[in-house]
Amino acid sequence: ARAQALVSAPCSRSILQQPFCFVAMPPAYKRPAAALAVETPQSGRRKTVPTISEAEQQCEVITTALRDTPGVPEAAKDMLIAALPPCLSVTREKRHTFQHDIVGMANEALATIQKELETDIANKDAKLADSAGEKQRRGSAASEAKTKADDAETLEAQRLTAKTEAKETEKTKQAALAEAMKQEKSSLIQFEKVSAKKTSFESLVSMQLEPLKSAGGGKREISTLAKALGAFEGFDASLLQALSTVLAKPADEHSSFDQIVIKQLDEALSDVKGKLDAELEVVDADKMEKASSKDAAQEARNKAKEAYDNAHSDHQEAVEARAGAKKALQEAENAQNSYDADMREVASALDAANEALVTFKNGP
């Protein structure tokens, strides 16, 4: 490169023979005022500005190029650019070891810049050389993206159907659960009703009848008892009427007739109790069955809810996948459609890179 040639040129020629070098200084370094001094014009005369020598121009070419050195911090560039002009202001054999080091650093930096330019050109050249392959790859990518987008659309539709069906199933199971809960509640009410009826009957016998059978009682007590017993199905009306006479006397005063009445009463009581026990057993079994049915309906509803939640999640995932596939398809089609323009851009960039390399080597 011309910049490199300027740095390493023989001391008897080119810039190395110049006593000073004018460079573009880094931001932290200001050119001495003397370098910018201009002649104070006399009355009627125009200002004059000192011209820059060829050697100074060559130094400025080098320092300008060094500004583009890749991978070097700006502070390091500033240091090198500031130190280089004094090193080039003397011929090679008169340079100190430190000055040789500075010049060597400049050569290394310029070589790095040239290598980067050449690498950029090689990469762009490779792209143009592989243009046919690139076109084929873009076409294949667009075709593959289209297939994936179609598959994603089909899957999304299938999962939407599955989600809708799962929702209907959940509604059905929810309705079945509501009915099962209703029946369980009804059976529980019936059980409690029969259980209370049995408890009331047993309390009536133990708390009211048995004391009257043993010690007898007054007319009002017997009448209240007979009325209460009559509320239970299974007592003959004539038997209940006879109680007013039989239970009015203590047990040790009962006649043969009274004893027959008491015996018939005990048999009637046993029958009523047996019927209540049987009825309670039936409603208890029904209560247990309804509870079991409700539990099964609850489990079925829970499974349907879980199935719907999974179907909903799967559908949402499919919706997102479809959107992603659609976006990928659009990008692939855009890349396919922009192929010609992209290749023209690479060719133009290659021309510019070649021109930049030539300029770097030969200078402006």
Image (cartoon, helix red, strand yellow):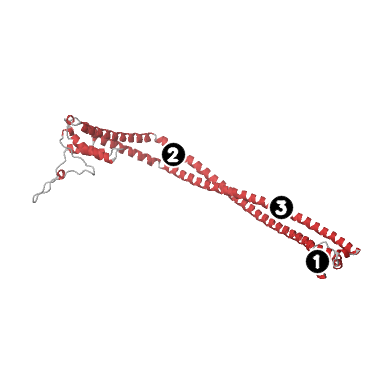
Q: CA distance from mark 1 to mark 2?
A: 102 Å
Label 1 crowd (10 A; few <14 / some 14-19 / many >=20): some
Q: Which residue is mark 3?
A: 288
- Residue under label 2: 138
Q: Quadrant of the N terminus?
A: top left
User: Disc 1 or 3, which lies upstream in sequence?
Assistant: 1
Under circle 3, the secondary element is: helix
Mark whose residue sits in front, 1 or 3: 1
* Secondary structure of residue under mark 1: helix
Query: Toward which corner of the image does residue 12 lie, by quadrant?
Result: top left
Residue 335 falls left or right of residue 106: right
Q: Nearer the viewer, residue 170 or 61?
A: 170
Which residue is denoted by mark 1 in the rendering?
225
| N-terminal-most mark, 2 or 3 | 2
Amino acid tagged 2: Arg
**Label 1 vs label 3: CA separation?**
35 Å
Q: Is residue 333 left or right of residue 87?
A: right
Q: Is residue 58 visible?
A: no
